[in-house]
Amino acid sequence: MPQVVSASYGVVLIAPVEFRVKPGLVENFSNVTVEPPDDRGLRRVRAGEEIIGSAWSQKDLRRILRRQGYPKEMDVEDGTFIRWRGGDSRTWPDHSVKRFITIVLMIVGLLGSMALLVAIGMPDALGGLTFAGRVTGYLFVIAGLIQGLAALAVLDYWGKRRMRFSGAVVLLGALITLTTGSLLMLLWLQEREYTPYLLAYFPLWCWSLGALWLLVREKTWTGVPHPKSFAAGVTATVIVASANLAYSSMYQPASRPMLVKLEAKFGEPATDSRNSFIEIPLTLRAQNKGKVPAYIISDDYSVYGHEVKLSRASDGLKDVKEAMEDESDAARFASGPRTETVTAGRFLSPGFPLESGEEYTAEKLVRVPKEAEYDALEVYFSLSLMRKDRGRIDTWEFQYPHFSWEKKEGRFYCPPSDCEESLIYHGKVQHNNNIVNVTRRPRYVTAWWSLTPEDSAASFSISSFRFQPKSQIDEKESRLEVDRYGVVNFYAEAMTPFAALTERGN
């Protein structure tokens, strides 16, 4: 109501009521509108027609206003300056604890997936044995980096959603975790062996199922201009990664044969006049003529002297059963060859690589008395190679020999009464694809070489055991692993008449 003021002159004056202006209110600021909360409890804030932010709480609202230059002590309860729609200044339905827990769980899952993918992909990306393997490694590293971006997008999507595609990025991260986790679980189910990585990818696979259920329920793809193209891109990435894994793990190693040429050749003999010995040069050669590099895991050579019984009269082939059992030759005029070892030794120690196009040659000298009653000399040369495109051997460990008869060798010690005295070579072998390595226990390759007065012998095995004596090897498992890592045995033989050597040596 107006206030009447009287004066002594009889004139009545009407004065307006005085309104109190709130402290710090400046007229050139626009009126503020706080809109109704959305389904998450977030309320958008407008200054005039301009959106200046979104607030979870009254404290958050004050922070937005101060950032826009509004007075710090501004009274947000003043309805004449701030218009409240869909609730007053006490309407803040944000579930901050639930939102915080969701953010933490999503970030932990995505960062865990990032660490796992980078740890799996980096060894193949930097040192893959095949081009396809390196491509697969890079794909895993890139997928890990996407997981890191998805973890950052979580803060925006469960925050104030300033980025349009943050939800789609988080969804992509969850899909990557589900896809890679499913791949690792499928590979693990093939062997069902415990590996420490199982404690990482199995929980992450379970996490991805829960995360996708939440993200699909919230329709996080909303805002993506072409959701079908987005889904097609994700599917194509999965197919490329799976194809590269299959190509590098199975097809490529199986489609390229290992072409290695072994040669054993006797040279021109010479006579040692001091001792009446015939000295026969022996050349052993191994050449990798293919495109598949390999590791030498076992080698051996022996020279044998043969003495046969000759007979002019014969009614047919002699020693037929023995020839069939030994898969050897049968002759009409010769029978019962007596064989003894003249020389035995090694070509190269296990662990040496034989790269594509590389060649190794060893020159030996065989000494035989001139009066020896041999009819022929024969050399038998064997070499066992493991493909490098199937696996990688820790050569530093594998090239070091252990002496089975020495107690100081610890677990490699084997009493001579229980087993032959042998040189033992033992080292870790890994698959050519690190994705397989993290789903299986480590494998170990062991090679034995023994030398006795009668002959020499070489053997090897690949198994999941750290080390076992030769008598305890599981032959079935070893054959499976030998095939898996592409071990191939090569042989070379040569024979020459001893009489010819004696003549040429004189």
Image (tube, helix red, strand yellow):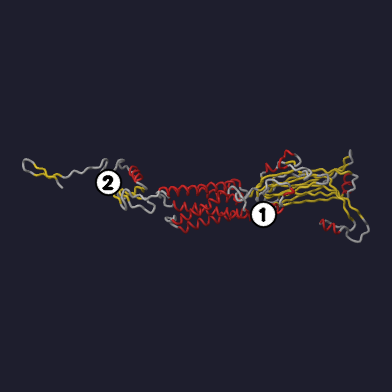
Which quarter shows the C terminus? top right
Image position of 452 (left or right of 11): right
Badge count:
2
**Is 4 on the left-hand or right-hand side of 330?**
left
Q: Which mark is residue 256?
A: 1
SS class of the residue under badge 2? loop
The single residue placed furthest to the right in the displayed view is: 313
Amino acid bearing label 2: Asp
Q: Mark 1: which secondary structure? A: loop
Contact? badges 2 and 1 (CB < 8 Å): no
Residue 329: x and y in percent read: 84, 57
Who's the residue at 43% across and 52% down the image?
A: 165
Of callouts 2 and 1, which one flags the residue occurring earlier in the amino acid sequence?
2
Q: Alpha-carbon neighbours of circle 2 within 10 Å: few (<14), some, or many (≥20)?
A: few
Q: Residue at x 8, y 41 (%)?
A: 7
Q: Amino acid at mark 1?
A: Arg
Depth-wise, is mark 2 or mark 1 nearer the camera? 2
Q: Could one spot residue 156 in this view of the protein?
A: no
Residue furthest left in the image: 9
